[in-house]
Every structure is written in structure tokens, then in C-alpha cells.
Amino acid sequence: MAKKIKQIAIYGKGGIGKSTTTSNLSAALSELGLKVMQFGCDPKSDSTNTLRDGRYIPTVLDTLREKSTVKAQDVIFEGYNGIYCVEAGGPSPGVGCAGRGIITAVELFKQQKVFEALDLDIVIYDVLGDVVCGGFAVPIREGIAEHVFTVSSSDFMSIYASNNLFKGIQKYSNSGGALLGGVIANSMGTPYSREIIDDFVAKTQTQVIEYIPRSVTVTQSELQGKTTIEAAPTSAQANIYRSLARKIAEHTESKTPSPLEISELRAWAAKWGDYLLEVEQGKVTSQGQAI
Amino acid sequence: MSKFIDRPRYTCALGGALATLRAIPRAIPIVHASAGCGHNLHNANNPGGGYVGGGYCGGLSLPSSNVVERDIVFGGEDRLREQITTSLEVMDGDVYLVLTGCMVEMIGDDLDAVVTEFLGAEKPVIAVHTPSFRGNSFTGYELVLSALAKKYVAKQAVKEPLSVNVLGIVPVQDVFWEGNLKELKRLLERLGLRVNTLFGEGEGLESIRKAGAASLNIVVSDIYGLETARVFEQVHDIPYITTGFPIGADETADFLRTVAQALSIDPSVTEAVIASEKSVYYGYLERLADIYNDIDLQRYAVVVADANYAPGAAKFLSDELGWLPELVVITDPVDENQKETLLKRFDGYESGLTPAVFFDTDASAVRKYLSKIWPANRNDRYYDSFSPAVILGSVFERELAAEFGYPLLTVSYPVTNRIVLNRAYAGFSGALSLTEDLLGLLVAGR
């Protein structure tokens, strides 16, 4: 019997550290001896840069633009530690349909049965933003990813995007779509940021799979065009990514989240607003900065 | 769940736009859409419109960008640019209208920007946004004519007195559009007017170009052509009036009086024209008096038609043919205000009859309304059955007609079971044709 390939999708608001987290996760998973593919689903096509020394790779759609048919093998590039890197790509900003582009690219890979041919253990889709249209929901529909993780900070707009994603997951959950593995809490810097995320996951009946602190090591590594795992393998931050990778490699049970209605979400945010005022008034001090 | 429409009697905005351009020789449509759009719409317009054909630039020779997945992902503007360039080169026309389908509008292709690049072309190129989600065939007619009114019709500060344009007869959706326009033109010319029907016999792009000189737009519809009339009012300062779609002596006389009044034409002229028309009209109808009475040609009737034909035909059947149009179903989607306007058309019949009027887009609904307005036969000793009856409808009423054994005359789109060339049902001559066709059904077996 063919082995089961674990397919996961990582979503989150733009700029929240999704690609950074995903690339470090891929790197850490590959260290565990797994055959990993990272599939960037963002028209910016920079998901896999740090796995390839900061270099861009030709995208599926760029290739499709030039040729009427694309052989998947032509758009797979090896990166750090043998990780297969793919970028879906997309149109220039303001034209065409990026959502359809993601669908086209993902379907092309599915049709050509590439994952099986490469004998992969795990495929990670790194998907743009907050599921603005059907195209960006493709990885969580039936037959693509099984588990979804969302990268979120304690910033309200990031939580808002995660909540939107939960709505998307809930919608497809009855038709065999992906379920939610949990939240990867990123940029944890203050004590309240952890509390906010903890409260949000409790409200939406999910879990935090890992807390990733804000770290200058990550920035330094990225400036070298590398993941933290590659550039600073012995750092504390690299170990956090390794811990995340182990948890995700072992993760089997995902669930349907309970997203908040928009009015509930606002009320919830307002409650935290009051709390933060107390922080500003000195009643609570930050502890996370020591990391 | 929102309501679905069972067998719609129209196509989409793009289909309506293509049908309208079919009626304008040397106006070339360039479709920016997937390959299926142009072909499928031709396959609806052609047979549904009594085999109107594709013409020089329709059917399979319709210029179309035929966008594929690549164009959707990256935007179809380059493909469109190429298609316009080559269409200008290959297709022999005098104006080119670029019409869009849904998919390129969904992805936001900038049609106007691309078309602007062709400002310097030898022939004008005009952009018309016609995705299906903007409306149905009737919307397509309005969009094309409004675009022509804005971009093609020459501005004329001084209007020609006694010059009129006729709007509201939608080519193909009114399967008898060409005959109807010809008849209305003939009648209006008898009032001493210069009549521009924009399309039809003797008309073409030159007529459209000159439409800005008219001093009045006559919208022969309560619903269609109004949007175009408003654009003409804004852009060309031409006022408009609306009238019912006239069938028969009474309604056509009213139509002529309404137009004459709007243009301050001497009533004695109008009345003389009406009298002369009536004399011819009744001269023919008088022939039927014997057979009508001998074998009793009075019938119940069910009218299932669009918002133009339904009121026009029902009134004619009741007040001129002496029939009993008990049930009328108007099959276009109309809003509450439009319903109110249309319902007034069924008031005050001379016969005293008040038809039951329903608005429903579903072909299958007619049967339901029939059983609603007429009591079912419960094995009563004496049962007043809805019989004998005739259905005026579209070809979609064929099953209903067969079920009840009523003869069917198809007058409303789609009319796939007839060949229609210059036949008219409007006006005086049209009413004679309608009488021929209706009573012809009844004597067919003799």
C-alpha cells in the first residue's frame, strides 16, 4: 500500500510571518529525515526564498504563460536539505485572477500525481492572506490538504484573518475539506499577547500548537537569505521551530473550529482593549522581551 | 435558497447585445469571453427568434477572443487587444462593438482602457460591458443602444421637427421585430412624420448616426427601451413618450393619437389616418363575419408572453376578436412598479372581461394558474369547462397545449416552430395577420 502523504496548509494574514514560519518548519521537518515539499500559494512567489539562499524560482504560472502545457517536474526546485520548492505564482498586481491561478497550479500538480512520484512524506502549502475568494480556499477543499494551521500574532487584524479562515474551514468541513490543526502563535513579545491568543483559541475551540517569540535571529537569518534552521542551527529560536516540526509531524487529529460571529469578535476585542489600557497604566509588565 | 427560473425566455445581456447587433448591418460585434458564449448564444437567438440567422458576423463567424485559462489567470487584455486588431483588419464593418462575457468581467479586465487604445482606428470601436450578471437579453438591448447613443449617434443641436425614433421593440426577443417596426413606421409616416426605427427595412448605421436629430423618442413599451430613451434625453436632449405595444384598431388608434398629441399634430390629420386605416382593416375583417358566426369561432384564450405582447394581445383578443382571454401570464422578471404599470393595461376592457394576470418566469407555472382561475371538473352534471380555448405563447407552451388539447400560436420568444421573416403582429396590418394565424388554427382541419 502506498504511504499516506501528509498534506498541510498554512494560512495567515499577509506579513504575519507565514513564509518565515513555513520555511523554518520545512527545514526542521527535513532534518527529521522527512521528504518535504513546500508549495507557495501566493502571487508574490517568495515563500521558498529562504530555502534557496534568497533566490526566486520560476513559478508554475510563469511557465504556463509561456507554454500551453507544463510538466510539473520543470517547476520543482530543490532547496535546503533536499526540500522540494514550488511557487504557484500569479498575475501582476491588478490584473487577471490570482485565485484562479492558485486553482490552476494546484490542480496541475494533483493531475500529474507528482507527490506520489517523488515519494514525499509531507507537503506544506503556504497560502496568502485571509481566504478572500474561492481560489485561496482550494488547498482546504476536499482532496488537497488535510490539516490547516494558521499563523497569527495577537494583533487584532491577524486574529480577524484567522477567524475568517476558521469560517472557510467550517464551511468545507462537511464536504470532506481540511480541518484545523491549530494556531501557530507568532511574534509573541509581551505577556498579554500570549494571553490574547490563548483566549482566542479557547473561544474558537482550537489550540495553540506552538508559541514562537519575536526574535532578531530570524531577521538576521532572513537577511542572509536563509532560514533560522540553516543560518543559526544552534539558536534557541531554531529549537522552537524544531519543536513545532515535531508536533506537526506527529499531529493526526484536526477539528472543526467554532469561528466567532463578527459582533462577538468585536466584543471580544473590546474586552482586550480595556485590559491593554491597564497594561499601559503600568498595572501589568511585559515579560516576553527577555527572549 | 433563491428562486430558480424554469426555462427562461431570454438569454443574457451578451445574448441580447448580439441579437441587437444582428439587426444592425455593418455593426460588428467582438466578443471578449470564452469560446462557448458566442456560439451558444447564437444557438439560442437563431432558432428562438424564428430562425433569424447569424448574418455576416454572427453564429460561427462571430469575432471572439475565446479566452482560455491562461487569459483568466493573467488577465485577458492582451488577447483582447489582439482580437480587436485582427477583427478591424479582417471584418468589413463600419463600427465595432466590444462586448464582454462574465468571466472577463469577474477578473476585472479593463475593457475601456483597451478600447481607448483604438481611438485612432479608422472605424470607431465602442466598449459595452455585457456580463450576464448585469441582466438578461432586454438589458443587452439597452446596453448596446445606450452605448451607441453616447458614442456613435451624432450630436445635433437643432432637431428636425416631426422626426421621431422608435424604441422598445427588441430584436429577436420580439421575434416579429422587423415586421412590427415596418408597420409602425408605415403608420407614423402617414401622420407626416420622419420615422427612424434604428433597425429593420431601410435602416442601418446611417439611421443610428442620425438618431440625434429626432425631436421625440417613442418607446413602444412600458418596460423596454426606457433606459435608452433616458440616455437619449440626457445626451441628445430628446424627450420621450411611452406607449403600449399596439395590436388592432383600438390600440393602434390610441397609439397614433398619443404620438400626434406629443408632437401637436392637427387632430383632424390623425383622425383621417385612423379612419382610412380602419376602413381597410374592417374591410378585411368583415369577410370573417360569416364563418365566425356559422361555426362559432369564439374561444377562451390563455396568453403567456413578454411584457409587450401580453397586454397588447390580450386586449386585442378581448375587444376586437371577441374572445375570452381569461388568463394572462407575463413571463419577464419585472419589479413592483413595472407590475403596477403593466396591470393598468388590463383595466377597462370594452368587453367587460377582466383577465387574471400573473407574473411568473416559469414555463411550468401556467398550468397551476389555469387550475387556480378555473374550477376543476368534479364530475358535475353540468360543468362549464375552459374549452374550446387557444393558447398564445411561446414554444414552451407546447406541452401545456398538448395536455389540454388547445391549439397553440407562438408569438413570444422562443418561437422555434415557425419561420419568421417580415410577419408583423403590431398595428393594423399586424392585427390582420394575427387574426389570420389564430382563426387559421381553427379551420386548419376543414
Image: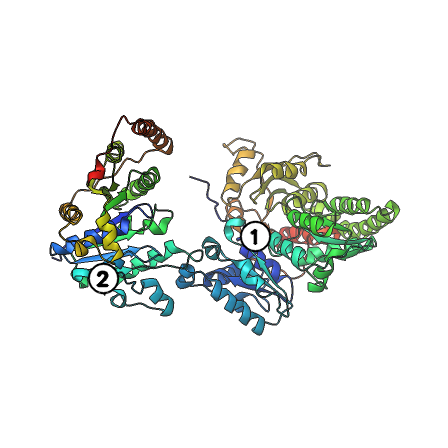
Residue at image location 50% in from the left, 38% down from the top: B368
How many numbered discs sit on the rendered protein?
Answer: 2
**Chain letter for mark 2:** A
The residue at the far bottom in this view is B90
Task: Give neighbour class at mark 1: few <14, some 14-19, many 20+ (Cα, 10 Å).
Answer: many
Q: Position of residue A286 (x, y in %)?
A: 24, 33
Where residue A283 sits, quadrant-wise, is top left
**Chain letter for mark 1:** B
> Label 1 to label 2, Cα distance in Å?
44 Å
Residue bearing the label numbered 2: A113
Task: Give neighbour class at mark 2: few <14, some 14-19, many 20+ (Cα, 10 Å).
Answer: few
Which of B340 and A72 lies nearest the eye of the viewer?
A72
Residue bearing the label numbered 1: B137
Horizontal side, residue B67 vs residue A203: left or right: right
Is residue B296 in view from this perspective?
no
Is residue A219 in view from this perspective?
yes
Horizontal side, residue B5 vs residue B275: left or right: left
Q: Position of residue B291 (x, y in %)?
A: 71, 49
Q: What element carries label 1?
A: helix
- Select label 1 or label 2 by which is in front: 2
Q: Say which mark, if any, is on residue B37.
A: none
Mark 1–mark 2 CB contact (< 8 Å): no
Residue at image location 25% in from the left, 39% down from the top: A189
Task: Identify the amino acid type marked 2.
Answer: Lys
Which of B438 and A273 lies nearest the eye of the viewer?
A273
Q: Quadrant of the C terminus of chain A?
A: top left
Residue at image location 61% in from the left, 43% down from the top: B301
Q: Where is residue A150 in the image (x, y as percent from the top left)?
A: 26, 44
Which of B199 and B48 lies nearest the eye of the viewer?
B199
Q: Is mark 2 on a helix, strand or loop?
A: loop
Vertical arrangement, residue B106 with respect to residue A68, above or below: above
Task: Identify the amino acid type marked 1.
Answer: Ser
